[in-house]
Image: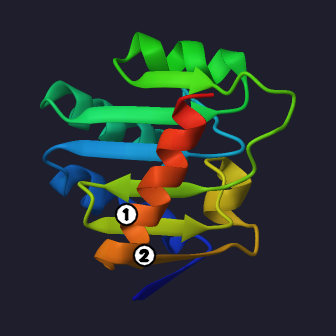
């Protein structure tokens, strides 16, 4: 298990995305895109996902806001907003069904730089299977 505190998030998660071979499944409350600031830590994270898509990794994302869904779809991410009135507040990344990141980080500059955020990365097949089922249940909404 690996604690991911505050600004460590992109430093820990981007290499995991770069190692992905088959799939990345993401659920997040707030996701930002900074096309005019490519060195921004969130945009570095976004660029890692684009690289994953380009090398054939299936990237799926459940987000709350239609504008980020459209942006993600333009770069090849299969993205959707759940069709309920409820907001999705969970934050999770599942990589190749072997590694999971779960915690408080949204994908925004404050979350990646100044907020007091805490997430954890871990490998636990049984828990990851349960989280994958949760992702699938949202994906079908």
x then y, percent, for residue 103: 62, 69
Q: Is residue 123 above or below residue 69?
A: below
Q: Are marks 1 and 2 in contact (CB under 8 Å)?
A: no
In primary-sequence order, the first of circles 1 and 2 is: 2
Name the image quarter holding residue 105.
Answer: bottom right
Give the residue drawn at x 19%, y 51%.
Answer: 20
Q: Is residue 76 above or below residue 16?
A: above
Q: Is residue 31 left or right of residue 124?
A: right
Name the image quarter holding residue 128.
Answer: bottom left
x then y, percent, for residue 34: 58, 30
Give the residue drawn at x 13%, y 47%.
Answer: 21
Q: Residues within 10 Å of mark 1 (few under 14, many from 20)?
A: some
x then y, percent, for residue 81: 65, 24
- Give the labeled residue for mark 2: 121
Q: Furthest-right residue in view?
A: 85
- Give the labeled residue for mark 1: 129
x then y, percent, for residue 78: 41, 22
Nearest to the observer: residue 86 or residue 100: 86
Quarter of the image that includes the N terminus: bottom left
Q: Is residue 31 left or right of residue 51?
A: right
Residue 60, numbered circle: none
Give the residue drawn at x 64%, y 35%.
Answer: 32
Quarter of the image that includes the C terminus: top right
């Amino acid at each position: 298990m690996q604690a991911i505190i505050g600004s460590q998030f992109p430093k820990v998660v981007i290499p995991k995305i770069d190692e992905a071979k088959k799939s990345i499944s993401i659920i997040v409350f707030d996701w930002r895109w900074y096309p005019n600031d490519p060195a921004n830590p969130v945009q570095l994270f976004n660029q890692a996902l684009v690289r994953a898509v380009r090398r054939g990794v299936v990237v799926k994302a459940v987000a709350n806001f239609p504008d980020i869904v459209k942006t993600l779809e333009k770069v090849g991410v299969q993205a959707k907003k759940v069709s309920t009135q409820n907001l999705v507040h969970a934050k999770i990344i599942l990589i190749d069904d072997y590694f999971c990141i779960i915690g408080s980080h949204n994908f925004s500059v404050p979350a990646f730089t100044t907020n007091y955020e805490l997430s954890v990365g871990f490998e636990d097949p049984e828990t990851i299977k349960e989280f994958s089922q949760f992702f699938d249940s949202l994906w079908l909404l």
